[in-house]
Image (cartoon, helix red, strand yellow):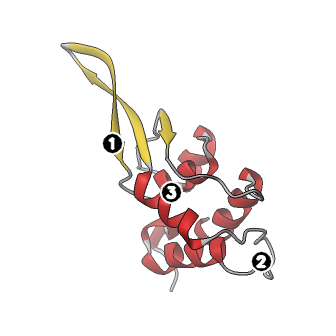
Amino acid sequence: MEAPQGQKPKIEGHVAALFLDLTDSNTERYDWTEYPGRYVAEVFKTCKTQSKYDIPWFPDIHIWWPRTNVSNIVWCLENYIDRALHKEVFPGIRTPVDVKEKATEPPDWDALDIRATWLKNLK
């Protein structure tokens, strides 16, 4: 099933495939991740994003929010936000200012491997 207007990140099956590829054996093309399910679940559970809101009486206020969409999760997994890529892959979703999570990265953690995996599933 193809997503309308290329919106794979909004289709449950693509998100489920991302979680599977993050945790299963890395035998597929562009899947170099084989992380413990506990790690991925902890990122999912503890992921928070910071967004900038222009509130007149609190200029430049930044508020931490629990993750609300799959874009938040991938940036928490990477511990980085690529603003240009966000606009391309997640159009219409506010780009966070910052992300944080409380999971302990596994010894083989690699942000580039994570990116290759989620791009394969969500772009």
Residue 61 located left or right of residue 87? left
Position in image of residue 100 (x %, y %): 50, 41
Position in image of residue 9 (x %, y %): 49, 66
Instruction: Looking at the picture, tell me which residue is in the foreground, 39 or 71.
Output: 39
In front of the other: label 1 or label 3? Answer: 3
* Mark 1 residue element: strand
Tell me the residue that label 3 is attached to.
43
Q: Amino acid at mark 3?
A: Val
Q: Residue at x 43, y 68 (%)?
A: 10
Residue 32 located left or right of residue 44? right
Quick check: 122 above or below 53? below
Which of the two labelled residues, at mark 1 and mark 3, occupies the earlier sequence position? 3
Which of the two labelled residues, at mark 2 and mark 3, occupies the earlier sequence position? 2
Which of the two labelled residues, at mark 1 and mark 2, occupies the earlier sequence position? 2
Q: Amino acid at mark 1?
A: Trp
**Marks 2 and 3, Cα distance to the nearest angstrom?**
20 Å
**Marks 1 and 3, Cα distance to the nearest angstrom?**
14 Å
* Mark 2 residue element: loop
Q: Amino acid at mark 2?
A: Asn
Picture quadrant of residue 26: bottom right
For this orientation, the residue located farthest to the left is 57
Tell me the residue that label 2 is attached to.
26
Q: Which mark is residue 65?
A: 1
Give the tally of numbered discs. Answer: 3
Q: Which mark is residue 84?
A: none
Position in image of residue 1 (x %, y %): 50, 86
